[in-house]
Image: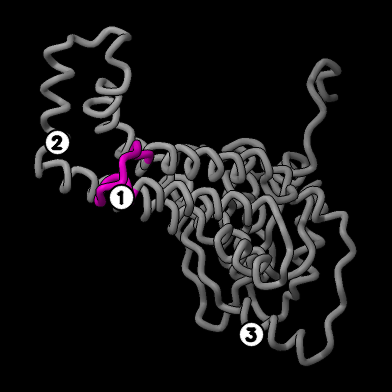
Amino acid sequence: MPDDPYREPRSALEAAAERRGMDDPNPDAGPRVARVPESHVHDTFEVGGLETKREESLLQAVLADHDGVSAASATQRNGTVGIHHDASVSRDDLRGVLESYDLAVAPGDDAFTNRRASQFASARVAVAVLFGLMVATPYVAVLYPTRLEWLFYDPVTVEYLRSILDSRVATHFFVNLATLSGVAFLVACGPTIRRAASAATDGRLTRELGFVAGVCALFGYSTLAAFTGFDGAVHYDLVAYAVAGVTVWNHFATEEASVERRATEPEVTASGTDQVADADADDRVALTDGGR
């Protein structure tokens, strides 16, 4: 029977599954379980082009049906494909198979490293946002009413909050704020701090150096205002807001180049020694099925 002329064109992945007589897999069926022979090796690829959970499941099924492949996992969320295969099947052969399905495969063997770096970046965003909220909450409840009493706060409440800030309880209050904002800065902005320190050592003036210096100055000013006789406002909230804002911006707005762009870059040919080292580093790196 001829194909329906009104049917949308099939993707290369769908066509491959149809040629192999495979049914459309159920994306909600859960992780695939396969027995991997001890002699099989594992390769990880960074790919672009997986857009749906259905394509993820379809790719896993098609790859697992290839000769010499015992198991395959694909993760649409972070663009990685893991394949357990016989040693007779080369990495270049697997790359060619993935590219035949119209997937953009990043050059080099650093897919696992890129994936781990992406996970750490997401963790830094979570730290910045969560710690920022933990700093903002006491500010909204205690400090902002004493600074914006003309807005809508009751004068009696404002006076009560000021009496708390003038008591010994305020010391513990500010210690908590200093700890939360400081930890958020050190953890979430760790890479930025290292790059700023390197720029300062080299005598270069960069935006990251200015940001780190500004946050450190604001943190120091707030610490003096909180724990000494220095008469000034405590701005740990601004430290937390700056850390959260810059971390989120760096993660989402200035995200590293996509896999499709990296796939167009020429692959650098390494020396024989480097190639062996890379192979040893990437060999037998395990992925849970689907990366979940």
> Does residue 57 appear in the picture of this structure?
no
Which quarter shows the N terminus?
top right
Q: Is residue 120 left or right of residue 260?
A: left
> Does residue 37 appear in the picture of this structure?
yes
How far apart marks 1 and 3 lie (CA) works out to: 45 Å
Q: Name the front one of labels 1 and 3.
A: 1
Residue for badge 2:
166
Q: Of the two numbered discs 2 and 3 on the same chain, state the one appearing first in sequence.
A: 2
* Dots 1, 3 in contact, CB < 8 A: no
- The amino acid sitting under disc 1 is Ala
| Magenta-span inclusion, residue 232 | yes
Q: Of the two numbered discs 1 and 2 on the same chain, state the one appearing first in sequence.
A: 2
| Magenta-span inclusion, residue 154 | no
| Element at label 3 | helix
Q: Residues within 10 Å of mark 3 (few under 14, many from 20)?
A: few
* Quarter holding residue 118: bottom right
Residue at left 57%, top 67%? 70
Q: List x then y, in percent, for residue 64.
A: 61, 59
Residue for badge 1:
178
How far apart marks 2 and 3 lie (CA) works out to: 62 Å
Q: Of the two numbered discs 1 and 3 on the same chain, state the one appearing first in sequence.
A: 1
Residue for badge 3:
280
